[in-house]
Structures are given as structure tokens and as C-alpha cells.
Amino acid sequence: MSKVDVLLGLQWGDEGKGKIVDVMTPEYDVIARFQGGPNAGHTLEFNGIKHVLHIIPSGIFHKEKLNVIGNGVLIEPAIFSDEVEALREKGVEPTDNLYISKKAHLILPSHRLLDAANEQAKGNAKIGSTLKGIGPAYTDKIARTGIRVGDTLEFDFREKYQLLKFQHLQLAKTLNFDIDSFRINNMTLDEYEVKWMDSLDTLRKFKLINSEYFINKCLKEGKKVLAEGAQGSMLDIDFGSYPFVTSSSTVTAGVCSGLGVAPSAIGRVMGITKAYCTRVGAGPFPTELFDETGRTLCEIGHEYGATTGRSRRCGWIDMPALRYACMLNGVTDLIVTKPDVMNDFDEIKMCTEYIINGEETDEIPFEYNEVEIKPKLSVFPGWKQDISYAKKYEDLPKQLTDYLGIIEKQTGIRICAVSISPDRKDVLFK
Ligand code: GDP
Ligand code: IMO
Ligand code: MG
């Protein structure tokens, strides 16, 4: 019996999960998404072409590998259908190697309307949702009122759909939301609904399976399975900076419920972190930089959301948050991305502890959102050179390997790989 390896983000998302999954896919037989939905934007680059995936796992470009969308994922059929079309335009036919769980829940157009209504109702306390309907769709899942992929094959699907939509519209009205002015991609709700319904045909052409049986059968046969996380640990519904979080379990525990595998079936847990830190949307970010350095990280790192295009907030790496994420996930290996963004920096800073009310602490406080947190910063010399020449870990400049060594020391976990460009070929394994 083989185990499920896990690859997930340790920060607030966008750590480079898509790229690393693509690079690691040759070592695996199956790549499976276990949570999240089209709020994710996973970027892959090879042969000079950039690809952004939202719902489809990042192993899809490897024809001979199977990809699975697990029961824990949310599917928005129209977005999914557009993603399939974009792949076809690039010569990739995903019906061949993508299986979808019948138990994955659907995002309805009216979930997206409700997402917007909820955000509007929050006023200044907005979460900064991607507005893909994530919160409302997971709400329905937990409330036992959701609709699953497999339900679209049943005779009473339309009836269920209409009932749920009606409830959503009622709720939006009580939130004083202007339904008539609401648009998705410049379409009214009714117009978008037509596109959404049509796209169900695309979805139904895929192999719809009980993915928990499929994955466990693969493990029994000794096949290697990689679970691909979306978002990041600090956006986890339980352990993130609540309520400024997403609505799913982004940590390793989510793999068990999102794919139907036992905790004892979890193998390596590879956690990804940038060499610095970013966050999109609202919520605490103790190491955030509001100065020129922050703007440089954003510009050089092209820190603009792959899903919404919003500019990402940038700051120094945050060790209390990283250690917390390593603890929650049981990380066995660290992967560091984007140190190349800091090639020209004279010095690199790292937050080693938080200072709250004058006291040093290593813990993420319950009052994360309210309390003033001063980062205790250590300063390291920059490497001041282009590192694109590096073909193996040992080629990296000493100042950088020293910095990476501090990350290992601070977390107690070894770094197994470093990524130094957006391209597939630039990952240095250690
Ligand atoms: P994900 O959501 O975790 O898959 O990450 P995103 O794709 O949203 O954001 C990561 C961004 O950084 C993308 O634009 C990647 O192309 C890019 N990227 C990934 N690894 C590296 C790296 O090592 N160096 C640089 N400069 N860019 C990288
Ligand atoms: P990937 O997989 C970065 C953020 C949103 C918002 C909060 C809630 O590409 O790393 P939601 O739409 O889930 O209700 O938004 O979570 N968020 C992400 N930030 N990367 C992501 O995914 C994200 N998915 C959601 O910006 O603050
Ligand atoms: Mg992303």
C-alpha cells in the first residue's frame, strides 16, 4: 500500500504550488485536488508559455498521468468549461486524464451573487473574497442543502436547482443587494445562468467517479498519489486569520476529508513558502511593507493575483506564521520559491518572533486581527547577483544558502528544493 504525498502552501496562498506540482508530476501516477475551487489560481510556465489553472489539477499537462478533482473541491461548471476550452486551444484534451468526484459540490450562479451580497453587507469589514461563490457554496454543503456533481445526473436536478436559487435570491434581498445590477463577466444573473447550464454538458462528458474508492484502489496497487493544495495554511477555515480566511480546510487534515483517505495513508508533506511573504485580500499581515521595498517585491515578483488580477500585499518572511503552518501540517520537507525576486536587495529581513504589548511571543494570538503586532526582525546580507545561472543547489551564492539555512534552523525542517524562476526547468533539488 503506498501513501498520499501532499504539497500545500504554508502562507496566504500563491506560494507557487502549481509550478511545483507540475515539476513533481513525473514522479507520481495521480495528482488530486482536495479542497478549494476557482478561487485558486495556479500558474505554470514552460516552453515560454504561461498557463493558469483554477479547478483542474496542475498535473494536467502530463498526458500519461491521471488527475482527480476530489469530493472536497467546489466546481463552478462555467469556469470549469472555460478552463477545459483553454486547455484544448493549447492542444491538451483533459477528458482523457481527468476524473471528477460525483461528491464534489457545485457553485451556482446565485452562490456568486450571494458572495457579492455578503461582501457588500460587510462594508469596511470585507474579506476581499475572490467572488467565485466559495463561502456560500461551502455554507450550503455544511447546511446539507448543496448540490453535487452527481446530482446533475438525477431527474430532479432542475427542481433542486430552482429551490436553492430561490433561497439565495431571498437571502440577497434581505441583504438589500441590487440583484438586477449584478453582473458576472458582464452578464446578468439570468444570462450567466444559461451559460452555466450549457456548461454542465462539458462537465458530464468527464469520467464522474466515487473518487474515494478510486484513490484508495490506486494506493492499494502501489500507485503514487500527490495531493495538491489550494490557498495556504494561514487561510485555513479553522487555523487561519479568521474571519479573513477561505471556507475550506487548507491543511493536511483536509486531504483526508477531501479525498477520502485515512490519516495513516498520508506520506510526505511538502510545504511551500516564498522567500518573502504575500497576501491578497484583507486581514492581518504583521510583516507587511508599505515602503519602496514592498513595492519592489510586488513589481519584481509580479505579485498580481492569478485569479482576480489584484495586486498582492508584500512583506518579509514570517517565521511565527511559518512554524505554525509546519506544526499544523506535519511538514516533512520545505520548498522555497522566488528568492530570485530579491537578487538586488542589499539586505534581507526575517521576522523571527512577534512583539505584542512589548512582549516577545512565538504564538499566533487569538486576537490576531485586533492586536498590534510588531515583527522582531533579523537582518541578513543580500547576495546581490542574478542567480539564473544556477543549475543545482550548490551553485547558489553563499548569502542565499545561509539565508535558506536559517529558515531550516528556524523551522527545524529541511529544505528539499528551491525554485528560482517561474519556469518549470528552474527548480533546484537539494
Ligand atoms: P499558486 O497559487 O501557489 O500556484 O501560485 P500562483 O501561480 O498564484 O503565484 C505564483 C507566481 O509566482 C506565479 O506567477 C508563478 O509563475 C511565479 N513563480 C513561481 N515560482 C517562482 C520562482 O521561483 N521565481 C519567480 N520569480 N516566480 C515564480
Ligand atoms: P491559490 O490556490 C491567495 C483569499 C482571498 C480572500 C480570502 C477569501 O492561488 O493560492 P474566497 O474567494 O476563498 O472566499 O476568499 O482568501 N484567497 C486567496 N489568496 N491565493 C489563493 O489561492 C486564494 N484563494 C482565496 O483573496 O482574502
Ligand atoms: Mg495562486
Image (cartoon, rainbow, N blue to C red):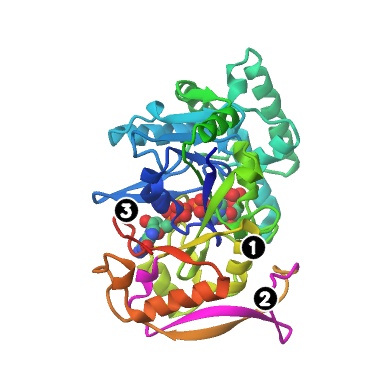
Residues under labels 1 and 2: Cα distance?
Answer: 12 Å
Quadrant in which the C terminus is drawn: bottom left
Number of labels in the image equals: 3
Which element type, helix, strand or loop, lies under badge 3?
Answer: loop
Dot 1 or dot 2: first in sequence order is: 1
Q: Amino acid at mark 1?
A: Met
* Image depth: mark 1 or mark 2 in front: 1
**Residue 327: numbered disc:** 1
Q: Amino acid at mark 2?
A: Asp
Q: Nearer the viewer, residue 427 or 412?
A: 412
Q: Nearer the viewer, residue 417 or 306?
A: 417
- Asked if the stretch drawn in magenta spans residue 344, the answer is yes
**Residue 424: numbered disc:** 3
Where in the figure is residue 51, as x and y percent of width and height?
Answer: 35, 46
Quadrant in which the N terminus is drawn: top right
Q: Write down the region rendered in magenta.
A: 338-366
Where in the figure is residue 137, as x and y percent of width and height?
Answer: 65, 38
Which residue position is annotated with label 2? 362
Q: Amino acid at mark 3?
A: Arg
At 53% from the left edge and 35% from the top edge, which residue is drawn? 219
Where in the figure is residue 265, as x and y percent of width and height?
Answer: 60, 43
